Image: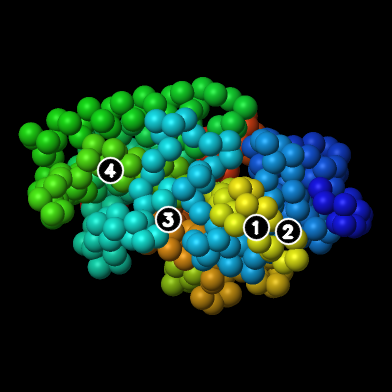
Amino acid sequence: MPADCHSGQSVHYMLKMQKRGMEVSSARPFDAQAFNANFNHHAAEFGAHREAIFDDLRARCPVSRTDAWDGFHILTRYEDIAAVAKDDVTFSSEPGITVPGLPADQMLRLPISIDPPRAFFYRNILARFFTVRWLKTLEPWMRDLVDDMVDGFIETGKADLQTQLGHPLTAKFIMHITGLPMERWYELSEPVIAAVGHGKDDPSGILRRGEASRILAAEIERQKTDPSGAPDEKVIPYLLSLEFEGKKLTDAELMGMVELLLDGGFDTTLAAMGNSFIYLSKNPDKRQQLIDDPELIPSAVDEFLRWVTPQQGLFRTAMVDTEISGVKIAKGDKVYLAWPAANHDPEAFPDPHEVRFDRGPIRHLTFGVGSHLCLGINVAKLEMRVAFETVLKRLPDFKVDESGVVRPPGLGIVYGVEHVPITFTPGRKRAAAAA
């Protein structure tokens, strides 16, 4: 921590967090200042106490530094984070967007791991599959998928919203649009979720991520001679059909683009959904508000994306000596763009820790900003909207069994939740209800 950061008072948030339906890991108040003396974004307690941790830093030292993971700067103000994310000249993605970095054979993610203008080439290739117009054609398919999954458990009065709804929804959607074999959705998605959700102190997640890469590489090779779908309908056949100046995309380019879709599509929205359903169970007045007025659901989705901020943030590397809000940043220094801190900055969002469905258009940074704004922004909103509408209509009195909520033992790139068990009044399957 820089010497000029005043010590302030230790921030204790236990009572406030309990009132908001947030989880706490100890009967004792959490000491954010003590944690921030050696800030570690992969520590398990970071996920449970992000609000307190970032509020403490923002109040005492909005641009701070930690020695963890060979050292990096931590940004906590919305204005600073947005400015760095938009400045691709001063702050580069190419030296690596995670700390610690990925293994060399897993680093290339296109376009997010390279800088403009090269990044725009790959972004423009993929963009056609993520427009609101294109996704609207897929909404009926998605609704049938979600209803089928609910039919599978609605008569039992109990379910796990992650394993029986969120996980298959997000995974099967990616399989559907890419042209990957639907029957392998779990085999391909589970290692990815383990990698992005587990803490960096647990190497098993990264090792298991290689399993998904090997499956994907074999599938791309197979589709070179036997494509799964028409090029104008599926991502992989489309990528394989492209030629630029008489040249096909390389295997590295193909893998880099599809790997990014897997990393972003399998777990981020799943994490947002799980945390949102936990909140709605703990705050039945908010849930009833959405049941009474379903037109609020799109606004609620945006607010939950801000409030949860499932992705912990990404990194940039300073390419020259520079400053951020008066703090010197040396060439080569890593800078942590903490999306959750930006989304809970009171200068950007009044009462930032409260869930409010009346905020209007929200300029949150859950999907980043600038040239690397997440391509999947419309996918995430569609998946969450369809899931919310279906659950609130068909399981309106669901209650989360908090004793069964399970999170990864550490914290990776995503603030995820592995199990969200619920009980509810049993209902009928669609066909039976229609009869």
Image coordinates of residue 338 in percent, x first then y, are 62, 54
Which residue is the site of mark 1? 321
Q: Amino acid at mark 4?
A: Glu
Q: Amino acid at mark 2?
A: Lys
- Mark 3 and mark 1 residues within 8 Å of each other at the beta carbon: no
- Residue at x 63%, y 52% (from the top left corner): 331
- Residue at x 66%, y 35% (from the top left corner): 69
Q: Quadrant of residue 170?
A: top left
Q: Quadrant of residue 284?
A: bottom right
Cα–Cα gap, marks 1 and 4: 32 Å
Cα–Cα gap, marks 3 and 2: 23 Å
Q: Amino acid at mark 1?
A: Asp
Image coordinates of residue 211 in percent, x first then y, are 36, 24
The residue closer to the viewer here, 44 or 7, is 7
Cα–Cα gap, marks 2 and 4: 36 Å
Q: Residues within 10 Å of mark 3 (few under 14, many from 20)?
A: some
Which residue is the site of mark 2? 328
Q: Which mark is residue 115?
A: 3
Instruction: Report the mark closest to the observer, 1 or 4.
Output: 1
Left-right relation of 421 to 253 = right
- Residue at x 59%, y 32% (from the top left corner): 199
Upstream in sequence: badge 2 or badge 4: 4
Which residue is the site of mark 4? 253
Q: Amino acid at mark 3?
A: Asp
Image coordinates of residue 275 in percent, x first then y, are 56, 48
Upstream in sequence: badge 1 or badge 4: 4
Upstream in sequence: badge 3 or badge 1: 3
Q: Residues within 10 Å of mark 1 (few under 14, many from 20)?
A: few
- Mark 2 and mark 1 residues within 8 Å of each other at the beta carbon: yes
Badge 1 marks a residue whose secondary structure is loop
